[in-house]
Image (tube, rainbow, N blue to C red):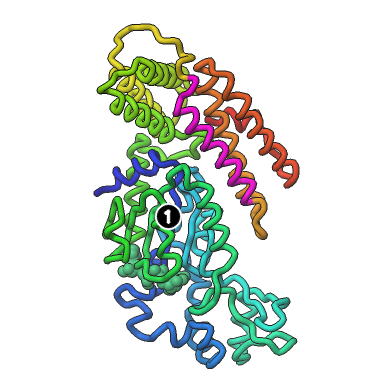
Amino acid sequence: MSYPDLAEKIFLHPRPWILSGAGISTESGIADFRGPGGLWERIDPMAYFSVEALNRNPAGFYSLGMEMFDLMDSAYPNEAHMVLGELQQKRLLGPFVTQNIDSLHQKGGAQMVYEVHGHLRTATCIKCRRTIVGFQELSRMVRGGQVPPCCDCGGMLKPDVILFGDSMPDDYNNARSMLNLFKGLEPVVIVLGSSLSVSPINMLPLEFKEMYIINQGATMLDSRAALRIDGRAGESMGLLKEHFIDMNGGQQMECLPAGFLPGLLIRGMDMAAEGLAKAASRKPQIVEEKCLAEGLMVKKAMQAYPRRSCRQPLEEYWLNQVESRAGDLIARCGRGGRVVPLAAASESRLLTLLEDFVRTAVQAAEKYQRQARYEPRVLKELMLQALGAAGLLEYIAENGGLQAHMLKVRILEERIEGLAEASGIELDSAKALEDI
Ligand code: NAD
């Protein structure tokens, strides 16, 4: 297994999710729990970082905890955080789910991060639940001798992190319900720097169609991984980025168009080829005709793809891949130069797949907006991705003369426009639809 394989997976399964653990931050100087030199070798975290320990011995929690928390607060993102943040911003990666409490993904540029074990940015009074102080204030109180630090009501202030024995935060439920939406699209996940031994989050990768693991040392789910790299997170992400730059003719990557989804087009054609292979013994003409029409539709669409002459090399490479897959599909139909009306693709599985993708992207934006805490810039990005996918579907359907799909997609577009209006976000829908 190598980085080119991982890069290919990222394009073939659009916008994989990331699940990260403490191992991704060791290169920023923060010890993990179970790796070599990890905290577990020195102390039993259960004895200090559980709800029970905090109630029994708050001074113990704060005397050991604050040192570690101060270190996390002042840490800088390393190469892994920086590359991952960049790849999410450039639309190669989907949401991040992190077990870490150090905010280093956000400092590395990531915008959509579910912090399933909480974070250190604030602390809340465990009695009145009303007082919330920033981390700097909490740290100042502890350094000034207030151990444990308390609110005016007399309740103890607790950092908004999940201790052993705490219930899971909203981010955990939000991440799960967002993932549930994507189930039908067979999402994949890249796990980085986690031994996958803390439940329930270590079960999350099993909910994806495939998982790829990058970790130094063994994890609990190695036998289930479709791809495994034993390596340091920073170095691995550096090599992955280098590979993308190589593919891009030595240039830094620009942000991909929101509707640039070659993996979906390839999957659609692979599905058609599978259908063809299954039908091979009986050779029903109708299957062949549909596949041929689908191949011809995609080939024609790729040849006239918008802005084809000024694409970055990485995009050009994938458009060529799609075109050549379409050529293979046409060849497999074995019908030589026989003319087949493009309308034979009217029940195209590729268009159904694209339609499912657009619907899911629209629902994802709507679901995100219903979260108690949402960031307008992330919502805007989700809306742009939904409109970009809608634009791709429109382009392919229009190119094949299949108007029926246009009506359904128009209704989905209107939902995004309504969402933009309701949330006060300005969107140039026409421009976003062309961003394919
Ligand atoms: P873990 O300690 O159980 O596992 C970390 C894994 O990462 C180990 O297998 C280790 O060998 C590997 N590793 C160490 N350095 C690496 C590197 N540079 N590149 C790749 N792999 C590396 O961590 P976990 O699975 O996240 O579970 C521990 C729990 O402790 C989590 O709940 C987390 O919230 C918490 N924790 C968080 C932090 C943080 O926020 N930075 C630090 C310590 C612990």
Which residue bears the numbered disc 1? 207
How crowded pointer 1 is (Cα within 10 Å; few <14, some 14-19, many 20+) is rated as some
Residue in the picture at 43% in, 47% down: 187
The answer to whether 434 is drawn above or below residue 379 in the figure is above
147 or 47: nearer the viewer = 47
Q: Is mark 1 within 8 Å of ligand 1?
A: no
SS class, disc 1: helix
Residue in the picture at 64% in, 28% down: 410
Residue 299 visible somewhere in the drawing: no
Q: Residue 123 at what x, y percent from top left?
A: 62, 76
Task: Specify whether 422 is left or right of 90.
Answer: right
Res 322 → quadrant: top left
The answer to whether 152 is drawn above or below residue 87 in the figure is below
The answer to whether 387 is drawn above or below residue 104 in the figure is above
Residue in the picture at 66% in, 51% down: 369
Task: Specify whether 289 is left or right of 230.
Answer: right
Q: Residue 405 at what x, y percent from top left?
A: 57, 24
353 or 158: nearer the viewer = 353
Residue 156 visible somewhere in the drawing: yes
> Was residue 184 drawn as part of the magenta stretch in this picture?
no
> Was residue 356 drawn as part of the magenta stretch in this picture?
yes
- Magenta region: which residues? 346-368
Ligand 1 shown in quarter: bottom left
